Amino acid sequence: MTKIAVSASGPDLSAQVNPRFGRAPYFLLINPDTLEFEAVANQENFQAAQGAGIQSAALVARHRPAAVLTGNCGPNAYNTLAAAGIPVFLGITGSVREAIEQYRQGKLSPAPAPNAASHWG
């Protein structure tokens, strides 16, 4: 089953896409064809003093999604996801349901690079 990971502000499809990948409260793992999903809490990482991006990327990568949809992603998280072979789609806004629909319609393109600065070098 193909799953898409989306950084989310809440645990369901009506939640807004969270603009900060590493500090998103949830990641929704969604089958884009059926909209069946699993909400994965990012509790430990979104409150981390540092390293939130890498830890969040590792959490998501363990679920092996076909892609990640998010607002912004720093270089550490981006590189962790890229190393796992997971394309990252950036600048995503609106509800999670809207983001998945845009993905399904082929309206989104994977980002060639991160779009946020590293906070910890």
Image (cartoon, rainbow, N blue to C red):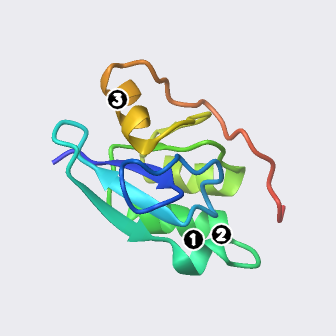
Q: Nearer the viewer, residue 97 or 104?
A: 97
Please identify the residue farthest to the front as the structure is shown. Answer: 14
**Dots 1, 2 in contact, CB < 8 A:** yes
Rounded to the nearest angstrom, the CA distance separating label 1 from label 2 is 5 Å
Residue labelled with disc 2:
52
Dot 3, crowdedness within 10 Å: few (<14), some or many (≥20)?
Answer: some
Q: Which amino acid, mark 1?
A: Gln
Q: Relative to residue 13, is residue 46 drawn left or right?
A: right
Horizontal and vertical percent position of residue 29: 33, 55
Label 1 vs label 3, nearer the camera: 3
Q: What is the quadrant of residue 32 in the picture? A: top left
Rounded to the nearest angstrom, the CA distance separating label 3 from label 2 is 28 Å
Q: Relative to residue 103, is residue 56 drawn left or right?
A: right
- Above or below residue 88? Residue 78 is below
Rounded to the nearest angstrom, the CA distance separating label 1 from label 3 is 27 Å
Residue labelled with disc 1:
55
Horizontal and vertical percent position of residue 51: 69, 72
- Above or below residue 70? Residue 52 is below
Horizontal and vertical percent position of residue 107: 43, 18
